[in-house]
Image (tube, coloured by chain):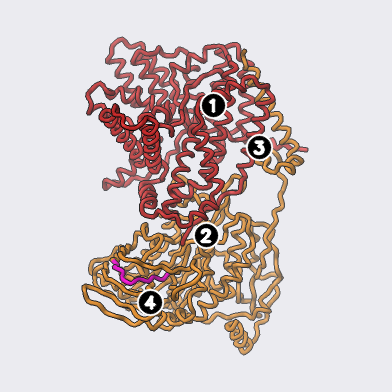
């Protein structure tokens, strides 16, 4: 029997049923919501204006002095390509002491500038940071070094900038464990071993004549013994943060044996005698809240020694683990005390908070930027604003909405198909963007210096009760309403006199 | 009621670079309905039918690849013309020179579109010269129709077929829409004669076509897509973020993804063709049940492996020039086969590994083939496992975006293998793992079972087919918006 008619009838019947269901899809979808994915008319129907349920964002707006000068401009957090201090000041740099030191370095002075760069798996294996480091070191002189390197790490196998080979049993303590043997370092790790042979190599390329210092970093315990070339020396471990110079030579290697049963070994640092040191502190899957486990004493001690000039916090993608999350107030509550703790205990260090980068989810078959991203960035900006930490809108600076999808799906891939991580190519692009923002900030400082104006200024903190302006609810997720450039109809804030300001500052500081 | 946006209807008819036509587009349903009605109306006259099929195929090509439809038309005219010249030439040297130009031009076009950037990259890496990559877009199906053109002109040269007299039939042979995107590679000598027969679909053809269409769609759109998006892509893009155990599961996942994707598409093409009264030979036969690499290539992408055998391996001398040359020819055939899949070192390595696998396979068979120590089912099982894992190992190079990623993937399996976090892993990926298991179970279904289903459903009324098809649509719609499985990055 010839079934040609049967073929036609079957195709027609199935299509007619499907079309009928599509015509009555409004009714049918309530019984079977997934039908929207196979609605044959979805591409040709006149689309109704869908009112998206917006995220209620508290719009802190701009506060103005009596003479109409902006004092606190929260909306500056939306700026791309620049570091902001929420003060609507486009002349002063966001980072001050840090830039002063950079200028000194560029003038040929022997200064060492150390940056701690905190992050999650996005910077694992020294991704992004290796390129930022290289660009900074190239820009400010030839002295190079990889900076901090942990004894072992989940990413050590693919980290190109440094290698650590170990022989011997090592006990690892980290952020994820409930109980800790001793204090953890910024990396989220500490290591213990009775007898550990360590062969360390700094793979950052440098000129052959450069002297590189190789340090062993460790914490508080009983003592630590280090054996180099058959000579054993015991060192005290009575401070929260201790370090031993293993060697200072042109070599990029260090080979030694360490014995440290009760003293936490933090890691190694390979650095030039002067120049820029950028330490990568990556820990997979965290949001930054975990840094609360770092002891206040460690922070204070490090601050007193002036070890770090700048600390960068680059978190966020791990907060977006559910596609439809739009409320990150819990993160604000968890992260604010962490930032306050760091700020209070480290008065000699400046801080910089990054917004999250882009992350996408599969919404009904199409990968799109997470719907909650604006809300998260707003939350992070509030954190920075409320703790008086400069902010960098990382998301907008790398291209904003749709960037990670474009990068993961393009022929020349720049991001992984998890729509979270940049690959080596994407990391380089991202690092260049970050570097430009840092240099942009540095150039502001340089201009002030050339004009003989002070770089370090005190930020005027406006008392909280007066800062609150009329709240504006933003209605869309993806389209942001533009902030008025001129303060039309804005309530004018009367700035209290200096004595009031001082007392308020105190109050703010003790919060 | 509904409000149709007629502007959208018009724009739907045009090529959209963001949304090229695929079998799972809503537009394909309208396309298929329009096509089958026209095809049925003109069923009596094979020439009219061929014109309808050609026009629809070219339109499909346009909707899938835009202006590149011009290339397939030009290519058809060129090969149609040159094959006639080859046929008419009296002297062998003239025939040979026409064949030479046919090969050079067909491969030249393929090389230009597919391999230019690859060679620019090589020149940039190995010389002082620096060229900017051209980022040339690849016309859809060019790898397939280039090989179809070559087989045709070579067959004419060898005197195995006479050139086709009607250009429409030849154009249709090249552009036939069911096999356009991912094959199978069809031979003109099998395909064109079927066009001239009456449009006839037997009970068995109808049933088999339906079975292949539905199972093909399930394999491609449900199993393959789900595992790809929710596990395999994450791991292969960043193997360093996953431990060895996770990488290994992703590898087993990928083995089923590539099988379901490729064979699903082939089944769909073969099934739709069956409903048009055209038989395209089977392209996949449960390849992971193979007990040797050479058996694998008799079961995997059969239309390609047989093409390579007939037109490359045999042209090199096949097994007629001694053992060494036989092995060398085998190796070179697989190397070229690898390179055909894509312009990267990874595909070359993948082909080379299969080439070495075939050579070892051949040597092993000649040395130990006749020795029997243990029962055959045990050796079959052992060799089956070895072959499967060899094939899986080679897939690492096939899937990874570059050599570094492939090496990282292997490194993770060898040096970072741990069951730490296995519970969390299973908890997170349970649906993906269930899907992988289903994929392997489908793969293990013996052909006799499929034949039984096809035979039984022949007697079922039309309503049965409607219900099954609607069931598939419901299932597909469910999986299309299934909550995505987020990657977990474990650190303990």
Q: Is residue B465 above or below residue B162?
A: below
Residue sitting at x 57%, y 16%: B49
* Residue furthest front in the image: B374
Instruction: Determine if residue A149 is in view.
Output: yes
- SS class, disc 2: loop
The residue mark sitting in front, 1 or 2, is 1
Do marks 3 and 4 share a chain? no
User: Dot 3, how many residues are within 10 Å of its Cα: few (below 14), some (14-19), or many (20+)?
Assistant: some
Residue closer to the observer: A119 or B263 = B263
- SS class, disc 4: strand
Q: Which residue is mark 4?
A: A263
Question: Is label 4 in contact with label 2 (beta carbons under 8 Å)?
Answer: no
Q: Earlier in the sequence, mark 1 or mark 3?
A: 1
Q: Locate residue B419: give its quadrant.
A: bottom left
Question: Is label 1 in contact with label 2 (beta carbons under 8 Å)?
Answer: no
Q: Is residue B425 above or below residue A5?
A: below
Q: Which mark is residue A357?
A: 2
Q: CA distance from mark 1 to mark 4?
A: 67 Å
Do marks 3 and 2 share a chain? no
Question: Is label 1 in contact with label 4 (beta carbons under 8 Å)?
Answer: no
Do marks 1 and 3 share a chain? yes
Q: Which residue is mark 1?
A: B449
* Residue furthest right in the image: B1
Q: Which residue is mark 3?
A: B474
Subunit bearing disc 1: B
Q: CA distance from mark 1 to mark 2?
A: 51 Å
Q: Is residue A66 above or below residue B227?
A: below
């Amino acid at each position: 029997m010839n079934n040609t008619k049967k073929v036609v009838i079957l195709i027609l019947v199935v299509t007619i049923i499907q079309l009928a269901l599509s015509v009555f899809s409004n009714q049918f979808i309530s019984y079977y919501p997934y039908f929207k994915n196979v609605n044959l008319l979805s591409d040709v129907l006149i689309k109704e204006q869908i009112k998206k349920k917006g995220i209620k964002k508290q719009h802190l707006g701009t506060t103005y002095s009596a003479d109409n000068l902006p004092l606190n401009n929260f909306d500056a957090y939306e700026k791309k390509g620049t570091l902001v201090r929420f003060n609507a000041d486009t002349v002063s740099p966001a980072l001050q002491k840090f830039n002063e030191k950079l200028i000194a370095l560029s003038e040929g002075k022997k200064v060492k500038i150390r940056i701690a760069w905190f992050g999650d798996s996005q910077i694992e294996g020294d991704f992004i940071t290796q390129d930022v480091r290289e660009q900074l070191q190239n820009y400010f002189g030839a002295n190079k070094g990889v900076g901090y390197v942990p004894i072992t790490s989940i990413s050590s196998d693919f980290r190109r900038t440094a290698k650590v080979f170990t022989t011997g049993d090592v006990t690892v303590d980290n952020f994820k464990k409930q109980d800790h043997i001793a204090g953890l370092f910024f990396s989220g790790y500490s290591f213990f071993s009775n007898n550990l042979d360590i062969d360390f190599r700094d793979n950052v390329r440098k000129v052959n004549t450069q002297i590189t210092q190789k340090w062993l970093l460790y914490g508080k315990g009983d003592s630590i013994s280090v054996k180099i070339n058959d000579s054993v020396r015991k060192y005290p471990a009575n401070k929260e943060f201790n370090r031993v110079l293993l060697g200072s030579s042109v070599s990029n290697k260090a080979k030694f044996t360490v014995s440290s049963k009760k003293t936490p070994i933090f890691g190694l640092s390979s650095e030039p005698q002067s120049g820029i040191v950028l330490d990568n502190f990556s820990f997979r899957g965290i949001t930054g809240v975990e840094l609360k486990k770092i002891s206040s004493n460690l922070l204070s001690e490090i601050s007193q020694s002036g070890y770090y000039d700048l600390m960068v916090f680059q978190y966020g993608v791990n907060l977006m683990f559910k596609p439809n999350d739009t409320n990150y107030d819990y993160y604000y509550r968890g992260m604010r005390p962490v930032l306050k703790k760091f700020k209070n205990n480290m008065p000699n260090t400046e801080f910089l908070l990054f917004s999250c980068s882009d992350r996408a989810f599969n919404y009904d078959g199409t990968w799109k930027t997470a719907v909650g991203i604006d809300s998260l960035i707003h939350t992070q900006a509030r954190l920075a604003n409320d703790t008086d930490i400069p902010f960098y809108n990382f998301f907008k600076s790398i291209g904003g909405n749709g960037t990670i999808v474009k990068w993961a799906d393009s022929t020349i891939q720049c991001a992984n198909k998890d729509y979270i991580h940049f690959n080596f190519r994407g990391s380089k692009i991202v690092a260049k963007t970050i570097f430009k923002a840092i240099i942009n900030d540095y150039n502001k400082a340089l201009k002030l210096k050339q004009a003989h104006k002070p770089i370090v200024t005190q930020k005027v903190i406006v008392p909280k009760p007066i800062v609150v302006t009329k709240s504006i609810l933003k209605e869309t997720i993806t389209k942001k309403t533009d902030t008025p450039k001129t303060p039309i109809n804005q309530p004018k804030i009367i700035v209290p006199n200096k004595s009031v300001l001082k007392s308020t500052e105190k109050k703010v500081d003790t919060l | 009621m509904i409000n149709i946006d007629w502007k959208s209807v018009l724009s739907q008819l045009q090529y959209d670079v963001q949304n090229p036509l695929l079998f799972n587009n809503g537009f394909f349903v309208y396309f298929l309905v329009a096509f089958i009605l026209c095809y049925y109306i003109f069923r009596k006259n094979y020439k009219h039918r061929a014109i309808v099929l050609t026009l629809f195929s070219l339109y499909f090509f346009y909707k899938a690849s835009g202006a590149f439809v011009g290339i397939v038309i030009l290519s058809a005219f060129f090969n149609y013309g040159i094959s006639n010249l080859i046929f008419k030439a009296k002297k062998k040297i003239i025939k040979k020179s026409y064949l030479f130009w046919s090969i050079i031009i067909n491969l030249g076009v393929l090389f230009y579109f597919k391999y230019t950037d690859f060679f620019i990259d090589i020149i940039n890496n190995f010389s002082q010269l620096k060229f900017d990559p051209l980022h040339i877009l690849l016309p859809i199906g060019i790898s397939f129709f280039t090989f179809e053109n070559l087989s045709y002109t070579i067959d004419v040269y060898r005197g195995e077929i006479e050139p086709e007299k009607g250009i429409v039939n030849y154009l249709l042979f090249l552009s036939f829409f069911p096999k356009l995107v991912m094959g199978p590679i069809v031979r003109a000598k099998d395909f064109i004669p079927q066009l001239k027969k009456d449009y006839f679909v037997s009970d068995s053809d109808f049933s088999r076509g339906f079975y292949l269409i539905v199972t093909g769609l399930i394999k491609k759109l449900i199993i393959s897509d789900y595992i790809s998006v929710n596990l395999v892509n994450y791991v292969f893009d960043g193997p360093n973020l996953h431990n060895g155990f996770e990488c290994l599961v992703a590898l087993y996942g990928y083995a089923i993804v590539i099988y379901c994707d490729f064979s699903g598409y082939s089944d769909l093409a073969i099934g739709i063709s069956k409903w048009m009264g055209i038989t395209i030979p089977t392209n996949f036969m449960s390849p992971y049940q193979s007990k040797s690499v050479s058996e694998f290539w008799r079961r995997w992408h059969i239309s390609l492996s047989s093409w390579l055998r007939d037109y490359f391996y045999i042209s090199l001398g096949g097994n007629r020039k001694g053992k060494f040359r036989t092995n060398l020819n085998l190796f070179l055939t697989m190397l070229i086969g690898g390179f055909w899949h894509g312009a990267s070192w990874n595909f070359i390595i993948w082909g080379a590994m299969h080439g070495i696998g075939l050579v070892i396979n051949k040597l092993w068979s000649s040395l130990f083939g006749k020795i029997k120590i243990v029962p055959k089912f045990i050796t079959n099982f052992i060799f089956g496992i070895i072959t499967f894992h060899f094939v899986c190992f080679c897939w690492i190079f096939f899937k990874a975006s570059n050599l570094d990623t492939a090496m990282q993937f292997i490194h993770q399996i060898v040096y970072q293998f741990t069951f730490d976090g296995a519970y969390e892993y299973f908890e997170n990926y349970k649906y993906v793992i269930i899907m992988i298991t289903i994929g392997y179970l489908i793969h293990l279904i013996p052909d006799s079972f499929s034949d039984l289903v096809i035979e039984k459903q022949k007697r079922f009324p039309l309503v049965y087919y409607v219900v099954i098809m609607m069931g598939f649509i419901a299932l597909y719609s469910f999986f299309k918006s299934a909550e995505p499985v987020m990657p977990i990055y474990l650190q303990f």
